Amino acid sequence: MLTRRRTLQHHSKGPNIHTGGLLGKSESSEDKATGGKAAGGQHGKVLMLTASSGGSAFQSIPGLKEMVYENRMTYAQKWGYEFMWANITSYDFGAKTYWNKIPILQDAFHRFPDVDWVWWLDLDIIIMNQSLDLQTHVLSNEAMLRSLDVDGIIYTANHRPTEMKTATSFDPDKINMLIANGGWGMNVGSFLLRRSYWTDWLLEMWADPLATKQDWVFPENDGWTHLYRHHKIVRDATGPTKQRVLNSYHPKNPNGAHWEQGDLLVHFAGCGGKPICKDYWHEMWELREKAPVPESVVKELANGTAKIETFEKGQST
């Protein structure tokens, strides 16, 4: 179903080693991606990843995709990160479209063999703080320990506390996924995955047919929650952060912590296609940090060459 184009590299250590594996690095030039280069043309250690296709109700906001492209690329070039915007429907594997983010993640690790972390960002997210880089914010060991939600209550997607809590201590070197924990559960609209055997395994299990065929309300999100709740190997390599570290919600979201000045991003989860979402979006857009937009990005948006939804399954870009 979710095929790979890598050869397994054998290591003597267990699945929490964050090098090698089916998502391992390759020196093959044909594996190199050709779009979304960071400043100076070098591959960064982080890939920012967004996916969309066509025109959902939320995408009816005029100029939305152009704003998102400007927002992502300005941040990526400021900090030397890569950016990939995938056409989500082209990655269809027979499940509901929500699940397509999983083969997209697999493809992203393959296309960008030099990145260590992939940061998934749903389309309905604005990076609000351009001055906050991921290394000092959450990826260094010190920042990670500062950001993790230790012994925190885990909620369901309908804001009900469960009997589970996050771990009472963490080892940053064994964490392969960072995802915000909050009043709406662990939302997969914004999360970071580290290249590792564990990540390779997780992506395969996440898209298991037994999961993709379930009639869940939040399909791929409920699939992730199921894995976290029922598999210790998932919990052991997952770092649930305090919510506003990676996933602040827009002020009208009834569940979870709302965006505050200085937060990395704002996520419009739950807004969907409501007419008022347009007003919410523009209100937050005006509150974002007004960082200088790179000239190359301005030109791409002006002449129609911006790489919006250009990455497709099985095609080089």
Image (spheres, rainbow, N blue to C red):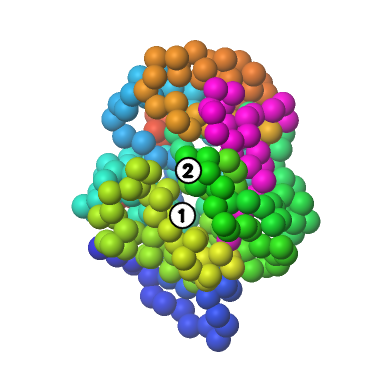
**Where residue 206 appears, x then y in whole percent?**
39, 60
Position of residue 97 in the picture relative to residue 185 (left or right): left
Q: Residue at x 50, y 29 (%)?
A: 268
Residue closer to the observer: 301 or 65: 65
User: Few, some or many C-alpha atoms within 10 Å of disc 2 (few <14, some 14-19, many ≥20)?
Assistant: many
| Magenta part of the chain | 238-262
Q: Residue at x 54, y 28 (%)?
A: 254
Is residue 265 in view? Answer: no
**Where residue 112 appears, x then y in whole percent?**
47, 55
**Where residue 252 appears, x then y in whole percent?**
55, 22
Magenta includes 245?
yes
Q: Earlier in the sequence, mark 1 or mark 2?
A: 2
Is residue 147 in view? Answer: yes
How would you classify the magenta stretch by its main secondary structure? loop
Mark 2 — residue? 157
Residue 145 tag number: none
Residue 225 tag number: 1
Q: Residue at x 46, y 65 (%)?
A: 230
Mark 1 and mark 2: Cα distance apart in space: 9 Å
Relative to 95, say whether 124 is above or below: above
Q: Amino acid at mark 2?
A: Ala
Relative to 65, say whether 279 is above or below: above
Q: Amino acid at mark 1?
A: Thr
Position of residue 36 in the picture relative to residue 292 (left or right): left
The answer to the question of whether label 1 and label 2 lie on touching residues, with beta carbons closer than 8 A, is: yes
Residue closer to the observer: 45 or 203: 203
Q: Secondary structure at mark 2?
A: loop
